[in-house]
Image (cartoon, rainbow, N blue to C red):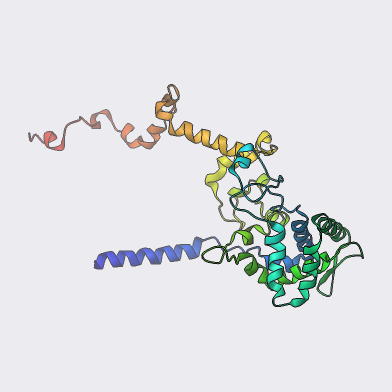
């Protein structure tokens, strides 16, 4: 036991030292708070797209909703909606209703928006999004746009911005009274899907067309090199330009894996390892022995003359 514990202690020390010397530093994460603080106009534009149903998740499709923005194949449709998300409610209105219990000034805008028809809500949101993209600017910590037919959307979006900048949006998105733990990370993880993540990924060479999955978020450190072949498949033009890129790439990867797994039973293909001669590299010591040193097939006792 003494030797076991001392060996274990040495291993632990070595692991900690090597991790400190060669471990990849922690990359500063992209958070809702940091994005809202650094990009207030873009943050409100993103939130407005959740209101009008044009956001990345709002219009995603299965497994989140009935949108069509990211539907790649019939299989995706057949899978159904098993992680339901209503971006308008889950990402914007519900967090604001929680904030309204602390800040009652949000309530009138919420009531005005929720009492309007869906067509009117979309019109307000579309008008405000267009104004943001064309003329949005920050004045005294608030995003302002020229006067227009926006209804209560500017008040809602500024409240959403303040909620994001305060850091409370994360907690509002995570809280879910419908699950046992009362907390669910799904909405928090998906809130910044789309432009925010793409803008953060591009300078780090982490986007799909940049072979991103094999790169590290911290420059100078190795990434997931074992994903080179799947990433290479994604770069094939007919895969990359297909609306079903994920389905095609995964199918090709599965076929390649299946061929490798069944190699011993595929006539002709199972002879390839012999022709390549890789086994001679693995067992090079054996094949480099002089003929006189080759094993005779006798046991050690027989070699010594003991029967």
Residue 175 in the image: state x and y as whole percent. Answer: 60, 67
Residue 278 in the image: state x and y as whole percent. Answer: 42, 32
Q: Quadrant of the N terminus?
A: bottom left
What residue is rendered at 33% in x and 64% in y? 8
Residue 35 in which image quadrant:
bottom right
In depth, the one of 117 and 85 nearer the eye is 117
User: Do we see residue 265 in this rendering?
Assistant: yes
What residue is rendered at 70% in x and 47% in y? 67
Residue 101 in which image quadrant:
bottom right
User: Do we see residue 233 in this rendering?
Assistant: no
What residue is rendered at 80% in x and 72% in y? 108
Residue 290 in which image quadrant:
top left
> Position of 106 compared to 18: left or right?
right
In depth, the one of 252 and 76 nearer the eye is 76
What residue is rendered at 79% in x and 63% in y? 115
Q: Quadrant of the C terminus?
A: top left
């Amino acid at each position: 036991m003494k030797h076991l514990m001392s060996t274990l202690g040495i291993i632990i020390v070595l692991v900690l030292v090597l991790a400190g010397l060669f471990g990849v530093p922690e990359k500063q994460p992209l958070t809702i708070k940091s994005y809202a603080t650094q990009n207030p106009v873009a943050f409100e534009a993103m939130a407005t797209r959740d209101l009008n149903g044009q956001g990345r998740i709002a219009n995603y499709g299965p497994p989140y909703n009935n949108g069509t923005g990211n539907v790649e194949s019939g299989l995706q449709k057949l899978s159904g909606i098993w992680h339901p998300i209503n971006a308008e409610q889950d990402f914007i209105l519900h967090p604001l209703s929680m904030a309204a219990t602390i800040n009652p000034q949000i309530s009138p805008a919420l009531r005005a928006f929720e009492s309007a028809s869906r067509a009117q809500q979309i019109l307000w949101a579309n008008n405000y999004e267009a104004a943001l993209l064309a003329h949005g600017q920050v004045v005294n910590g608030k995003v302002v746009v020229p006067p227009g037919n926006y209804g209560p959307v500017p008040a809602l979006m500024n409240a959403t911005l303040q909620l994001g900048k305060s850091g409370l949006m994360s907690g509002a998105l995570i809280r879910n009274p419908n699950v046992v733990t009362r907390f669910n990370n799904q909405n928090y993880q998906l809130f910044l899907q789309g432009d925010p993540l793409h803008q953060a990924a591009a300078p780090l060479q982490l986007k799909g067309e940049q072979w991103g999955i094999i790169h590290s978020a911290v420059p100078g450190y190795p990434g997931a090199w074992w994903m080179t072949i799947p990433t290479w498949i994604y770069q094939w033009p007919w895969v990359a330009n297909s609306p079903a890129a994920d389905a095609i790439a995964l199918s090709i990867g599965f076929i390649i894996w299946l061929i490798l797994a069944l190699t011993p039973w595929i006539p002709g293909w199972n002879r390839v390892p012999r022709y390549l001669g890789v086994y001679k590299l693995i067992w090079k010591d054996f094949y480099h022995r002089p003929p006189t040193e080759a094993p005779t097939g006798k046991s050690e006792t027989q070699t010594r003359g003991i029967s």
